[in-house]
Amino acid sequence: MSARLVVLVSGEGTNLQALIEAAQQAEYGARIVAVGSDRPGIKALDRAESHEIPTFTVVTRDYATRMDWDDALTAACQRYEPDLIVLAGFMKLVGAPFLRAFGGRCVNTHPALLPSFPGTHGVRDALEHGAKVSGCTVLIVDDGVDTGPIVAQAAVPVHDDDDEKTLHERIKVAERALLTETVGRMVREGWCVDGRKVRIG
C-alpha cells in the first residue's frame, strides 16, 4: 500500500512537480493525497489541481495568533492522515502544535550544505563566503531554522562566474532529484531518527 504524502508549498511548485511525476510511478511507493499552502493563488496549487490532487490554504493573516494558525495548519494536514509531510518550498516556520503531531515525519529542503548557510539566503551567503562547493540538504523539521537532523545531501560546485541566480538554478536541479529520491527511499524502506542521525532502511 502506498504511503500518504501531504506536500506544503508557497510558490512556483517545481519541487512539487518533481514529486508528482515521481509518485505517478507505481514503484515509487507513495501518493500525494493533498497539497497545502499558506498563500492563495500560487502556481503550485494550480499544478496540484491540474493533477486532481486536493488542495487547501491556511493563510496566516486569517488567524489572531501564530499559534492559532499553526493549530489550523496541523488540523488541515491531519485530515489527510499523512505518513510523511514534505515542505517543498514552504516559506513558513511550523510551530509546537505541528511538531507534536508530525515530529520525525516531516522533511524540508534547503539550498545549501547544512549546517553551513542556514536561513532564507543560503545561496547568497555561500557565494559571499567564497564557498567552492555548495549544494542542497533534505532534513527532518524541528523547532529551529534549518537545524533538524540531516537525511541526505548533494553537492553542487560553485563556478568562478556564478551569481546567485545561476548557482541557485543548478542547486534546484540537484534539489529536485535529491528530494524525490530521498522521499521515495523513506517511504519504501522506512526511516528512524536517533538524535542527530537519520537512518533510512
Image (tube, rainbow, N blue to C red):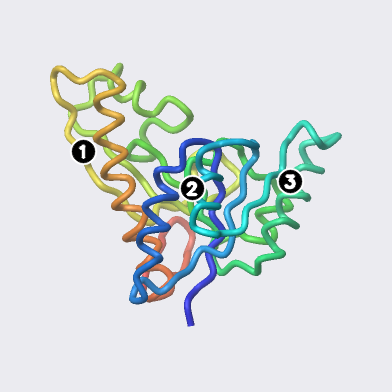
Q: Residue 14's x, y, as percent?
A: 40, 43
What is the three-letter code of the residue carrying label 1?
Val
**Left or right for 80, reference 7:** right
Q: Which residue is mark 1?
A: 156
Of the image marks 2 and 1, the number of the one nearer the N terminus: 2
Kindly give the residue lying farthest to the right in the view shown.
64
Name which residue lies at 30% across and 49% down.
153
Q: Write down the residue under mark 3.
A: 70
Along the line of sight, the residue nearer the viewer: 114 or 18: 18
Residue 169: x, y in percent?
28, 32
- Element on which disc 2 rests: helix
Disc on the earlier residue, 2 or 3: 2
Q: Report how far apart the C-alphas of labels 3 and 1 lie in the structure.
A: 34 Å
Do the CB atoms of the residues marked 2 and 1 lie less than 8 Å apart? no
Q: Position of residue 7 (x, y in %)?
A: 54, 54
Q: Quick one: 97 or 83, which is closer to the camera?
A: 83
Note whether 149 is above or below 37 in the view shown.
below
Q: Which residue is mark 2?
A: 47
In terms of image quadrants, where is residue 112? Answer: top left
Q: Nearer the viewer, mark 2 or mark 1?
A: 2
Left/right placement of residue 60 relative to residue 83 reads right
192 vs 21, nearest the viewer: 21
Residue type highlighted by circle 2? Arg
Q: x, y (%) of residue 38? A: 65, 39
Question: Cβ–Cβ below 8 Å for labels 2 and 3?
Answer: no
